[in-house]
Amino acid sequence: MNDLFSGRLKINNVSTKDTEVIQDSLTGLDRYEIFLKKLQKAIDNVGDQRISIIYTDIKHFKYINDTYGYQVGDALLRDFVSEMLAGNDTLICCSRVYSDNFVAANYMSDGITNEQFKELICKMNLERENRFREKYLNSRLQFCTGISVVDKNSRSLDAETVVSNANLARKVAKELEEDCCVMFDHSMMEGIKREVEITSHVPKAIANREFKVYYQPKVATETLELIGAEALIRWQKPDGSFIYPDQFIPFVERSGQIVDVDNYVYREVFRFLAERIAAGKKVVPVSLNVSRVHLNKMDVLEYVKDLFEEYKVPTDLVEFELTESIYLDNTEKALELVNGLHNIGVKVSMDDFGSGYSSLNLLSRLPIDIIKLDRVFLKDDTLQESDKIIISCVVDMAKKLRIVSLCEGVETVEQSNYLKEVGCQIQQGYYFSRPVPQEQFEEIMDREQVGV
Ligand code: C2E
Ligand code: CA
Ligand code: CA
């Protein structure tokens, strides 16, 4: 710590008589309110100095508590604090905001740029991670840090704002796979504004039926017949413009609103299928996407059962897609959902296979019916030799495990022919059809042909 913060030392004391009230009993650090007061005083007197606000939390800390008990968890937190304080002569104040979230304010040395400072914190985090992973036998433990800097240009900001900026950068860091240290910048505020704007409009958008279900055909490789479709959501604003899922799903997942949005999509699809069935028209199975958020509540199974009951749609006409990462993050809950769906006769697929840390082991352990190979394997028009090998191996393995294989993102005839060659049973992609609105999908169903 010493080299890092070798600036001028200035400890701010907030006078109080009762030390018990001002300290966090677990770590002995200042309570957050006291921290804010000290930081505010330092900001007011920042002069030509710079102050770094370092907000850190410990990813997968809960695992330590759950596995080894709270005593070990507490010891880890105290260890973290002693490391943070050891020999640090530029510390202004530090505090545990809650649980495993810590914030520290330090004077920064004159010569170091903000970027270099971030790199140093990153390096320190990595070194600390190695030590802690060994000591606490948890290879996933990770320190995620966000930093904001106060200098004479930003001294009008209050303590709470600069901590909240550092916390925002920390949240960004937490979503990154590797670089677990991020410096706050103002563009992050734009992202937050967009997120708030989107999520605040969702309830009205549901009520106004602004969400539209599009259908993307799935085609049997052997016969090129239409054998199913995936329901994909689109948000059509009253002015006619579209917002695509990637631009709002992550936000509504974070806000928890995805449950309402998905339930809306599911209901629309059930209603559509029931109407076609009642009119004696052709129908094909439609697959629905499941967000990871559903697993926390598990009401999804009951909701789906009620829909089958209400609309009298046969259970082999609806399938569910769970992404590979859902299975990996929460295998037990995912298994519970898959079994629940199987019990009522509904098929389940593993979506986006190959997009993340695919676990081949998982494939054999989970009772899934269909594996959807992610379009990463088809990223180029001309298939790479290495991708060809992976595709054929996965298809082969799926066949042996009696799992149906589907490849998504098929855009060219060459790709489609290769999938046929290796025996991938189902294909989906722009080569056959983009996702289309309900009316257009009905035409495709009535024609029984996909437009190739
Ligand atoms: P996904 O489930 O992997 O869906 C496939 C995505 O690939 C869709 O993007 C689709 O339009 C796109 N796609 C299909 N064929 C091709 C192709 O040949 N080339 C290329 N480049 N792209 C192709 P979309 O509709 O934008 O959806 C993005 C993601 O948003 C979906 O990925 C899914 O994870 C999520 N999503 C969409 N609708 C829903 C929904 O109703 N509920 C939930 N929870 N998630 C949804
Ligand atoms: Ca999907
Ligand atoms: Ca997918």
Image: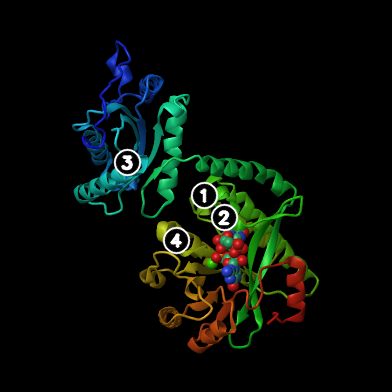
Q: Earlier in the sequence, mark 1 or mark 3?
A: 3
Q: Residue furthest right?
A: 279
State which tag comes first along the sequence, 4 or 3: 3
Residue type, mark 2 in image: Val
Image depth: mark 1 or mark 3 in front: 3
* Place of residue 386 in the rendered image (x, y in percent of width and height, measured from the top left): 40, 79
Residues marked 2 and 3 touching at CB (< 8 Å): no
Q: How far apart are labels 1 and 3 at the CA level?
A: 41 Å
Give me the residue at 35% from left, 41% from top.
57
Residue 223 placement: quadrant: bottom right
Label located before the other in sequence (4 or 1): 1
Compare residues 104 and 351 and report the one nearer the observer. Answer: 104
Q: Amino acid at mark 1?
A: Lys
Quickly name the residue at label 1.
297
Measure the alpha-carbon separation of dots 2 and 3. Answer: 46 Å
User: Is 335 situated left or right of 414 in this image?
Assistant: left
Point out residue 103 in the picture as x, y percentages from the top left corner: 35, 33
**130 or 113, nearer to the observer:** 113
| Residue situated in front as seen by the camera: 82 or 321 | 82
How far apart marks 2 and 1 lie (CA) works out to 7 Å
Residue visible at 39% across and 34% down?
Answer: 149
- Name the amino acid, label 3: Phe
Q: Would the CB of label 1 be found within 8 Å of ligand 1?
A: no
Q: Earlier in the sequence, mark 2 or mark 4?
A: 2
What residue is shown with label 4? 325
Mark carried by residue 117: 3
Q: From mark 2 to mark 4, how far is it between C-alphas? A: 18 Å
Q: As drawn, which residue projects farthest toward the top?
A: 17
Q: Name the N-terminal-most of marks 2 and 3.
A: 3
